[in-house]
Image: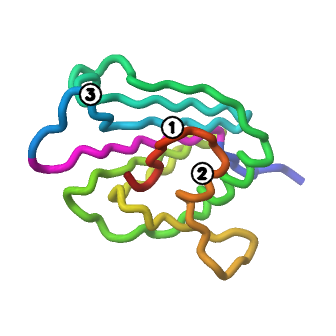
Amino acid sequence: MSDDITKIKFVHLTSNNICFGLAPDDNTEVEQYLKIEASGEVSFSARNYKQYNEEKGYCREKHISIDKSKVEYLFQLIENIYETDPYATDVGSFNLVIFYDNGSTRKITGSLIGNVFSRINGEESDIDLNKVIRRSIPIRKMWVFNG
């Protein structure tokens, strides 16, 4: 019997809160990056508007470890994300890339308005991924899928 199950190696989420209209001031945080690895390592960083435009530097960075059981649960939920709501304009956007151990990737994009849900283990009710990620990863003011 072969073990051909493809597993998530890590996920990378970019949350961008830039909207139409007036540009934010240089010190306003506008983009966040979250990487969760199967090992439990979590990297978070954020750029303000000036850093975003210059494509260098971060206004916040944090590196932590979380329990592998939390990672396994998060990865199960992420693997089972179902269609998000239609794209809305002028609210920012997210880009989630799932990297698998076989080298393949899966991309999920949407508006930064939340409404990203999953189901696990035959459950009938929706699980709000925003809430679960925020409860699992203790980083303040993390947007995830809504700003």
Which stretch appears magenta? 9-21
Q: Are marks 1 and 2 in contact (CB under 8 Å)?
A: yes
Q: Residues within 10 Å of mark 1 (few under 14, many from 20)?
A: many
Indicate the position of residue 73 as horizontal and vertical percent values: 72, 54
Q: What element does badge 2 sit on? A: helix
Badge number at residue 133: 2
Kind of residue sitting beneath label 3: Asn
Residue to which mark 1 is pinned: 34
Q: Residue furthest top?
A: 57
Q: What element does badge 3 sit on? A: loop
Q: Residues within 10 Å of mark 2 (few under 14, many from 20)?
A: some
Compare residues 60 and 116 and report the one nearer the observer.
Answer: 60
Residue to which mark 3 is pinned: 27
**Between disc 3 and disc 2, whose residue precedes?**
3
Q: Residue at x 78, y 40 (%)?
A: 67
**Between disc 1 and disc 3, whose residue precedes?**
3
Camera-nearest label, 1 or 3:
3
Q: What element does badge 1 sit on? A: strand
Camera-nearest label, 3 or 2:
3
Does residue 16 sit above or below 26 in this rendering?
below
- Which picture quadrant has residue 100? top right
Indicate the position of residue 57 as horizontal and vertical percent values: 36, 17
User: Whole-Å distance between the Cαs marked 3 and 2?
Assistant: 26 Å
